[in-house]
Image (cartoon, helix red, strand yellow):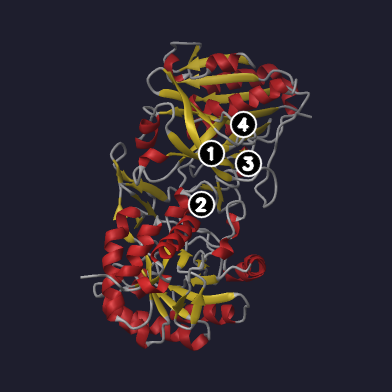
């Protein structure tokens, strides 16, 4: 059985359309006990900043109906430790690495891109302009088309690597933000990041997470994400990578039919560390059964 | 030395973590709020005292979404957990029947550090915090070590699950807040007496504790500078294996440690007890 699962994301060919989402898969080295992550289309690292970040105070997570809120606060080892400690091991394992980067200024985004541009083994950069859980930066860039365009242009000028931009569902006009990133040289758009939510403990009358609000993820998010991917993919010419509640192969197929070129598995990895592998296996079986290539699904939503 | 299996978090050490598809073998109710769930696993799950599993029924569908971190009472082909009904996940577990399919991600986290072999140990348990301590006391009995002194506290006599099992492998002293069993008062008052009584020997001994945060903070404060103390942390967890970063606990030296991979068993002196877990 040979199924063609490869997809083209800008100039980058992925061995298949199943990736893992930033912030839900660590640095991918945590999976050695579970499965060979080099089989995946790629992994998006935890958001990397110029300096290490400790993250927010607890509690950081709270379960909600068919989903969860998180306000981790971009805890990460910093780009230097990533390049020194993590990347060589990922390279040795043959993992397709998408480095997700986060900064509070346009200049720092460019500096991160310059730093990662020197490294072998980074397949693409994903710009986190949509984190809802930090005081500065993050979502402010992602809800404003001009600001998102400026970040994209600065990174574009600093690296030859493919540049993906992760969209915020809180942008009033997502298509406008997407087009601004496209015009500034983005190779792909990732949609969507979490949506801010609130959960309250009725015993204490306090928010259930210390940051008060947190990003909603998981199956509860899927219909919204699917609709946004569908709209965004028709508004831009560059590929859209679908994310938001992908748990099963059927979810991945829905996103591709809606217009996604690839998908990212996020919260599902918390529930089952092998979730991404199961999505991949299920997608391969679906394509084999129908005698189609994975790319044949992209944007084929019937009316 | 003891026979306790100690596993580090570093890659390649100890038993591999794996997602085990198991069935509920039996559920034993202890009063209305507590249950022991015993599973049947085709593969033997190699577990050290203090380690935990992420537990989720396959019947749950998309809600409750996340697996629940549960300290393991036993491993092998019959892994078991002690639960107290506190929310939706444990409520579902408390009504599940034999044969229900579950997923167990295990073994997770760091074990208790091996107890000093010749010295008396004191185990301080509060409510469901008894689980990893019963595991430890049983391992110590198996290894032929001196019986630990176990101080077990609960709000009422109904909040002392598995006390009989504990009594079989330890010298057991009980405190309840309402005085319905054992000494009236808090378990930390028992500890004060026990430390005075054991006196000089405790310089070589060790205190192990698991229970509500306030109780563990009080135990840690009482032991500081006097006797080594190890705690088993309890926090909300998303994944249980180090990627969601949802289980930070403030370190005494600043920053956070993650209970799932750097704990749950850690030396009490590592924790900043002022900030809460």
Vertical order, B190 against A110 (above or below) = above
Measure the alpha-carbon separation of dots 1 and 3.
Answer: 12 Å
Q: In the rendering, at what x and y percent does residue B124 appear?
A: 58, 25
Q: SS for tag 1?
A: strand
- The chain that hosts pointer 2 is A
Residue that label 4 marks: B76
Q: Which callout, 1 or 3, points at the residue further toward the start of the chain?
A: 1
Of A34 and B245, nearer the camera is: A34
Residue at the spot 75% in from the left edge and 23% down from the top edge:
B119
Measure the alpha-carbon separation of dots 3 and 2.
Answer: 19 Å
Residue that label 3 marks: B110
Q: Are marks 4 and 3 on the same chain?
A: yes
- The chain that hosts pointer 4 is B
Q: SS for tag 4?
A: loop
Please identify, in this view, whether the residue under mark 3 or under mark 2 is nearer the observer: 2
Quadrant for residue A90, please give it.
Answer: bottom right
Q: Are marks 1 and 4 in contact (CB under 8 Å)?
A: no
Residue at the spot 62% in from the left edge and 69% down from the top edge:
A94
Please identify, in this view, whether the residue under mark 1 or under mark 4 is nearer the observer: 4
- Could you classify mark 2 by the number of other residues whose Cα lies within 10 Å: few (under 14), some (14-19), or many (20 or more)? many
For residue A273, the mark is 2
Residue that label 1 marks: B53
Please identify, in this view, whether the residue under mark 4 or under mark 3 is nearer the observer: 4
Q: Which callout, 1 or 4, points at the residue further toward the start of the chain?
A: 1
Q: In the rendering, at what x and y percent does residue A249 appear?
A: 40, 58
- The chain that hosts pointer 3 is B
Q: SS for tag 3?
A: loop
Measure the alpha-carbon separation of dots 2 and 4.
Answer: 21 Å
**Relative to A220, A265 lies left or right:** right
- The chain that hosts pointer 1 is B
């Amino acid at each position: 059985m040979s199924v063609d699962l490869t997809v083209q994301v800008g100039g980058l060919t992925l061995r298949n359309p199943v990736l893992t989402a930033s912030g839900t898969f660590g640095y991918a080295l945590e999976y050695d006990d579970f499965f060979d992550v080099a089989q995946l289309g790629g992994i998006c690292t935890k958001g990397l900043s110029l300096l290490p970040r400790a993250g927010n105070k607890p509690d950081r997570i709270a379960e909600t109906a068919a989903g969860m809120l998180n306000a981790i606060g971009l805890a990460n080892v910093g780009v230097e430790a990533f390049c020194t400690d993590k990347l060589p091991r990922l390279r040795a394992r043959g993992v397709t690495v998408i480095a997700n980067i986060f900064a509070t200024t346009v200049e720092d985004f460019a500096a991160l891109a310059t730093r990662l541009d020197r490294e072998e083994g980074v397949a693409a950069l994903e710009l986190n302009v949509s984190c809802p859980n930090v005081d500065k930066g993050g979502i402010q860039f992602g809800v404003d088309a001009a600001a998102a365009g400026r970040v994209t242009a600065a990174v574009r000028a600093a690296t030859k690597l493919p540049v993906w931009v992760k969209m915020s569902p809180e942008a009033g006009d997502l298509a406008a933000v997407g087009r601004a990133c496209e015009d500034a040289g983005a190779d792909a758009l990732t949609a969507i990041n979490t949506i801010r939510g609130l959960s309250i403990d009725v015993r204490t009358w306090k928010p259930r997470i210390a940051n008060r609000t947190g990003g909603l993820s998981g199956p509860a998010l899927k219909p919204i994400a699917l609709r946004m991917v569908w709209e965004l993919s028709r508004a831009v010419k560059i590929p859209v990578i679908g994310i938001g509640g992908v748990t099963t192969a059927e979810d991945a197929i829905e996103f591709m039919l809606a217009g996604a070129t690839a998908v990212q598995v996020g919260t599902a990895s918390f529930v089952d560390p092998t979730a991404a592998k199961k999505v991949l296996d299920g997608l391969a079986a679906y394509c084999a059964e129908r005698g189609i290539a994975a790319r044949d699904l992209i944007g084929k939503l019937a009316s | 030395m003891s026979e306790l299996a100690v596993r580090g978090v570093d890659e390649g050490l100890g038993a591999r973590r794996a997602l085990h598809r198991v069935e509920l073998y039996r559920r034993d109710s202890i009063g209305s709020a507590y249950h022991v769930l015993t599973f049947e696993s085709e593969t033997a799950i190699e577990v050290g005292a203090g380690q935990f599993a992420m537990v989720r029924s396959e019947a749950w569908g998309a809600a409750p979404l996340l697996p629940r971190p549960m300290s393991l009472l036993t491993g092998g082909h019959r892994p078991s957990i002690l639960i107290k009904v506190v929310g939706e996940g444990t409520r579902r577990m408390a009504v599940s029947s034999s044969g229900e399919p579950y997923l167990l991600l295990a073994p997770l986290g760091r074990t208790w550090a091996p107890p000093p072999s010749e010295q008396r140990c004191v185990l301080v348990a509060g409510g469901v915090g008894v689980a990893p301590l019963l595991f430890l006391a049983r391992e110590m009995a198996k290894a032929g070590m001196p019986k630990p002194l176990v101080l077990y506290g609960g709000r009422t006599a109904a909040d002392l699950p598995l006390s009989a099992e504990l009594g079989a492998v330890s010298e057991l002293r009980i405190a309840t807040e309402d005085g319905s069993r054992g000494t009236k008062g808090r378990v930390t008052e028992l500890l004060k007496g026990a430390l005075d009584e054991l006196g000089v020997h405790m310089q070589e001994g060790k205190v192990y504790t698991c229970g509500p945060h306030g109780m563990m903070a009080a135990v840690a404060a009482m032991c500081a500078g006097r006797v080594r103390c190890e705690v088993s942390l309890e926090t909300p967890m998303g994944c249980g294996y180090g990627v969601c970063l949802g289980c930070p606990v403030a370190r005494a030296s600043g920053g956070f440690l993650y209970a799932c991979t750097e704990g749950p068993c850690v030396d009490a002196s590592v924790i900043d007890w002022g900030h809460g877990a």
